[in-house]
Image (tube, rainbow, N blue to C red):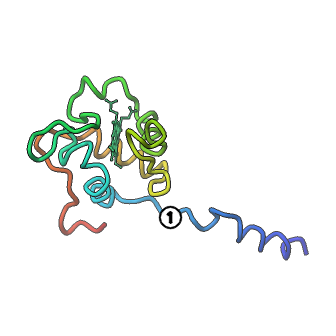
Amino acid sequence: MRWTILLPVLLFLPGFWAQAPAKTLNELKAFYATNCVKCHGPDGSARGADGKKLGGLDFTDAKETANENDAEMVKTIRKGLLFGIRMPSFKDQLSEADALILVQGIVRKAEKGKVITPEEGVPR
Ligand code: HEC
């Protein structure tokens, strides 16, 4: 009896169906290429293709990323910086799981000159 009331309530709770499955590393590389490049650079070095310094953190410089642990980075990616003014919030597009894969698989692995781009032929 109680289920007849509870079930419809559960189904209409916001977010019950919203939790998309975690993104793959390749999907996140594509996400990086569209959403992060303008501040963090195509290779993560915070320099544009023309070598000009951009506004974001240089992921390829161990000195700059040494103070940040993965959890802090995940938090910054989802919350943004300075109310989204310095860096936008991505919490509507990235779950915590997604952001952690992004940090460990892309941000931490960034190398100068190595453009972050999804691999051809790898299923997204
Ligand atoms: C509008 C510019 C902008 C965009 C777009 C942007 N960032 Fe940032 N990001 C910044 C700035 C500015 C900082 C702080 C740099 C500093 O502290 O020197 C930062 C810092 C970070 C940090 C360090 C976090 C910490 O704990 O301090 C991470 C990780 C990061 N960004 C990831 C990303 C990712 C991933 C994306 C794309 C999904 C992204 N950013 C998009 C500007 C941007």
Q: Position of residue 57 (x, y in %)?
A: 28, 34
The structure residue drawn at horizontal position 30% and vertical position 29%, both measured from the top left corner, is 65
**In the rendered view, does 26 fall on the left or right side of 10?**
left
| Quadrant including the N terminus | bottom right
Task: Tell me if mark 1 has few (under 14), some (14-19) or many (20+) residues whose alpha carbon lies within 10 angstroms of its own.
Answer: few
The residue to which callout 1 is attached is: 20
Indicate which quadrant contains ligand 1. top left
Front residue (pair 105, 74): 74
**In the rendered view, does 114 fall on the left or right side of 81?**
left
| Up-down relation of residue 113 to residue 66 (above or below) | below
The structure residue drawn at horizontal position 85% and vertical position 73%, both measured from the top left corner, is 5
The structure residue drawn at horizontal position 38% and vertical position 28%, both measured from the top left corner, is 68
Q: Position of residue 74 (x, y in %)?
A: 44, 41
| Quadrant including the C terminus | bottom left
The structure residue drawn at horizontal position 49% and vertical position 51%, both measured from the top left corner, is 91
- Under mark 1, the amino acid is Ala
Q: Secondary structure at mark 1?
A: loop
**In the rendered view, does 34 fall on the left or right side of 19?**
left
